[in-house]
Amino acid sequence: MSNLESLKKYLIGSETSFLVNKDNNGKTVMLSGAWGAGKTHFWQHELEPSLQNYLKDNNKACVYVSLYGKDTIQSIKQEVFIKASNIDNVVSNEISTFGFDALASMSNSDIDIGKAVNVAKNLVNLFKSYKGENRLRDGGIVCFDDFERISKKIDLNELFGFISNLALEMKCKVIVILNDEVFRGAKAKSFREVKEKTINKFFYFKPSVEELFASIFDDEKYSVLLSAYKEEILKAIQESGELNARFYIQVLDNCLEWIENGYNSDSIRTLTLVTINFIKNHFVLDYTILEKNNDKKLYKVLGKYYEGEGLFALADYFLKIAPQDVHQKLPHKEFIHAMFTHITKKRKDNNGVEMSEGYYQKLSKVFDENKEIFYALYYYGYVLKLEDDVSDEDFDRINEFVKTGVLL
């Protein structure tokens, strides 16, 4: 059974599963995994809808709160209880957009939904009425996402104190979603200390590329129109080696637009790889000169030692003269080391003048500053050969589409 399947079954698969079992009221669990692995998508699409239906019959709430951008514990508390009170969806959306404090201070002229504003101005009273608290007590569920992105203004001990109160005093089930590997220094120490006192159970979220892709592709807007291209898109994603839900969504959106506009379906692999490379590295492999200060600096440093201009030309030069084994699929660090070592063996220019130590150091700095670009050129251009199976016209159109977002 796959990681996602087993996790979903364990959490909500039956009446005795962890998140629906009343014996687990009062427990706090952590769902941890790498950024982009699809933790939020898993919660919102695989778990939350079922939990909402399960709790609705008992007038209990299932609340999702992103901690990203929250500055105070009070604003977090208010969002939890307001959402739990199940007030009008329009008002809930405004809270999510503007924040509780900002919304409460709005006048009717600020937004074109006067009724919503009038209700919003009374939200403090709703909060005091404990309607939200009652819908959470003894079996409600609160999910805190983006935990690692909380503001520096928020004290972790205070936040975990609120979480403990929800769990121990109100007997909620609390889920914390995060990538716990990002905490560093004093914050990491503080996080470990409060985590040990608060968290009852840990779940590690690590889907395979196939699992994560399948969970996103399941959306009807993709599965209907892109069904004939599913395996080809997945294979290209596997070639890239990327495990990132946001990447997959952008890939599928681009493929969907490409097919809907009647463009060549044979270009799907290239479109997928160009999209992923652009998301990661912010350029496409059109082999034009990069208009960057680093690029100009590179030309100045290397102009008399190597033909051509800029990063693309240097990578081209290296890959044409490098030993064959360098053209294999090397890990990032190994490739950069091999490329730098090979190029710096040439310490003389065409006139036989020795490269100074100063130039050598500048070259080393250029490599360090641009290693991601060098590796992308190597991996996407030379290992995956993303442009081999498409016409020049389609390749140019794909590059332009991915760069600008406009497909004409």
Image: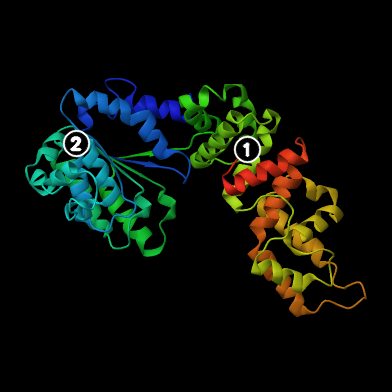
| Residue at 23% across, 36% down | 89
Question: Do tag 1 and tag 2 residues touch (Cβ < 8 Å)?
Answer: no
- Look at the picture and state if 359 lies above or below 7: below
Q: How is the image coloured?
A: rainbow
> Left or right: 247 with respect to 12?
right
Q: Amino acid at mark 1?
A: Thr
Q: Secondary structure at mark 1?
A: helix
> Left or right: 335 with respect to 150?
right
First-in-chain label (1 vs 2): 2
Q: Give the quadrant of residue 101.
A: bottom left
Where is residue 326? Give x, y as percent.
Answer: 79, 50
Q: Which residue is mark 2?
A: 88
> Left or right: 172 with respect to 152?
left
Where is residue 85? Give x, y as percent.
Answer: 15, 37
Report if residue 81 is visible in the image.
Answer: no
Distance of label 1 from label 2 (alpha carbons): 40 Å
- Look at the picture and state if 296 lies above or below 96: below
Q: Which residue is mark 1?
A: 272
Where is residue 243? Give x, y as percent.
Answer: 54, 40
What is the tally of numbered marks visible in this picture?
2
| Residue at 85% across, 53% down | 320
- Say which of 126 and 205 sits in front: 126
Where is residue 135? Give x, y as percent.
Answer: 14, 34
Q: Residues within 10 Å of mark 1 (few under 14, many from 20)?
A: many
